[in-house]
Image: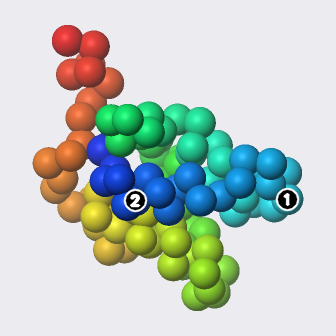
Amino acid sequence: MIFVLSQSELSLLFRQDPKTQNNGGFQYLLVSLQKRANRNSGRIALFASDISRIRRYAFSYGNGGWESRLKAIFARVLGPDLCGARPRITQLTFNRLAA
């Protein structure tokens, strides 16, 4: 699924230095998501496995800065529980992008 992040959400996503990709799971997740995000349009492709990982990192490992950052980046488009179950006007399908 394609989601559209706001400029402030993109800024939080791109705050992670790409050089830290191999420093741990959270760093790897954020840098890999950066690679799929378009800084100009805000569009980001998220698969079900990505949403699952985002949710797990945001809720299963404590409540520190990284967890708060994931919630700040994705709560608007995925819902407050980050499961992607709420209706969203910013969601596009891959087929609609190709049209």
Residue depicted at 57% across the width and 43% down the height: 34
Residue depicted at 37% across the width and 61% down the height: 8
Which quadrant would residue 60 be assigned to in this image? Answer: bottom right
Render colour scheme = rainbow
From the viewer's perspective, tell me whether residue 82 is left or right of residue 29. Answer: left
Can residue 52 be seen from the camera position used here?
Answer: no
Q: Amino acid at mark 1?
A: Asn
Residue reaching furthest to the right? 23
User: Which label was assigned to residue 4?
Assistant: none
The x, y position of residue 22, in whole percent, is 85, 51
Could you say which is closer to the camera, residue 87 or residue 21?
21
* Depicted 48 relative to depicted 59: above or below: above
From the viewer's perspective, tell me whether residue 20 is left or right of residue 52. Answer: right
- Nearer-N-terminus badge (1/2): 2
Callout 1 secondary element: helix
Can residue 98 be seen from the camera position used here?
Answer: yes
Asked if the residue under mark 2 is in contact with the one under mark 1, i.e. CB atoms within 8 Å, the reply is: no
The x, y position of residue 87, in whole percent, is 16, 55
Q: Nearer the viewer, mark 1 or mark 2?
A: 2
Could you say which is closer to the camera, residue 18 or residue 44?
18
User: Which label was assigned to residue 9?
Assistant: 2
Residue reaching furthest to the top? 99
Check disc 2: other Cα within 10 Å, few if <14, some if 14-19, many if 20+: many
Callout 2 secondary element: helix
Residue depicted at 44% across the width and 39% down the height: 39
From the viewer's perspective, tell me whether residue 19 is left or right of residue 87. Answer: right
* Depicted 33 relative to depicted 84: above or below: above
Residue labelled with disc 1: 23
Could you say which is closer to the camera, residue 95 or residue 73?
73
Q: Quadrant of the C terminus?
A: top left
